[in-house]
Every structure is written in C-alpha cells, then in structure tokens.
Amino acid sequence: MNIRKLKQKDAPFMLEWMHDPFVTRFLRVDFASKTIEDCKMFIELSQNSHINMHMAVTDDNDIYMGTASLKNINNGMAEFAIVIRKEAMGEGYSRYVMEEIIRIGLDKLKLNLIYWFVSPENKRAVKFYDKNGYKRVENIMDCTSLAAVFNGEEYQKIEAGNYIWYIVK
C-alpha cells in the first residue's frame, strides 16, 4: 500500500466508486451524476491546491484504491475525508491511509486539529473509527475547537447535529 498524488490514470477507478451506490449511499454529495471529465478536472485541480490535499491510496502495483483528503485547510485545522473502492474495503487500506494522512496533517502541515463526521447510519464506518480509537465529539455544539467551522458557515448547526463527529489533535 502506498499514498501518492492523484494521477489522471486514476480517473476511471474514481468514477467507478462514484457510481457505486454501495460506496456512496451515506455520502452527502451526488456522485452518481459525476462524469469522467469531472474526475479528471478534480485530479487536475488537486495538483497545486494549498487549501485541499487529495491523495490516492494505491496497491503495491500503483493501482488506485481510493482517495483520502484534508480539506479546507485553514487556521491550523482541516477536515478529513476518505473513500475506498468497494473491492478494497476490508483490506486495510482505510487504516493505512488514515494513519498516513493524519500524520502528514499533524507533523508536516503542523495542523492543530483534524475533524470529520459520519452518518450514524453508516455503521461500517462508525465501527471502524471507534475500533481504531478515534475520539468522538459527543456534543458538537459544545466543541469550541470547531467553532471556526460553523462561523465560516461550512456546515449548518442543524445539519451538524445529524452526524457523529470525530477529532484528532
């Protein structure tokens, strides 16, 4: 397993997971409407972004297995996101890439806080995060560390209460 910058050759595999209802059923974005051109543009825009870091997780033959991201990097904070192709689920890719991306965020980018959220209906993801010891934020409205996220209107407070939030400091 490895992580690297996204490459244009990843676009067909990226589109594959975007059109897989099993992979996307709990995600907030309408990925089913995405095209190969959307994937190629996303990859192109990811190459020099200082606000977002999108990395490919690959197998040992450099085949794309998913994307892990630090998004909205600002004020020492970033939002973590991950998606893994269905065929790669349960093979250790999620654990590997999470550890690597969080290490990069904290050690190299010098972030103070990485946060993410998951639908409570996504029992597979919740079980994974809990099993791997990631810290839940029990009441997101009481978490002053995330105040900037809401002050920046990234998420509506009502919407925030519908998810399970995690943080790494």
Image (cartoon, helix red, strand yellow):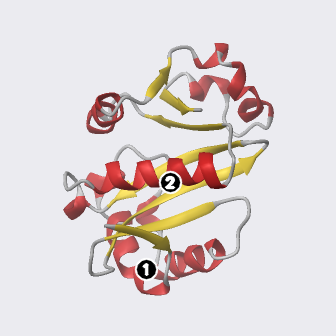
Q: In which quarter of the image is residue 154?
A: top right
Q: Do the residues labelled 2 and 1 touch (CB within 8 Å)?
A: no
Residue 38 higher or lower than 144, as above or below: below
Q: Tell me the amino acid under the disc marked 1.
A: Ala
Task: Pick whichever, 133 or 126, lies toward us.
Answer: 133
Task: Report the side of 38 relative to 21 (left or right).
Answer: right
Task: Report the side of 121 relative to 47 (left or right).
Answer: left
Task: Pick whichever, 165 or 17, lies toward us.
Answer: 165
Q: Say whether residue 29 is visible.
A: no
- Residue linked to disc 1: 11
Classify mark 2: helix, strand or loop.
helix
Kindly identify the residue that appears in the image at 79 percent across and 42 percent down: 75
Which label sits in the foreground, 2 or 1?
2
Residue 70, image x and y in percent?
Answer: 59, 53
Q: Which mark is residue 43?
A: none
- Residue linked to disc 2: 101
Spatial CA distance of label 2 from label 1 is 21 Å
Residue 147, image x and y in percent?
Answer: 74, 26
Screen quadrant of the C terminus: top right
Residue 50, image x and y in percent?
Answer: 73, 64
Q: Residues within 10 Å of mark 2 (few under 14, many from 20)?
A: many
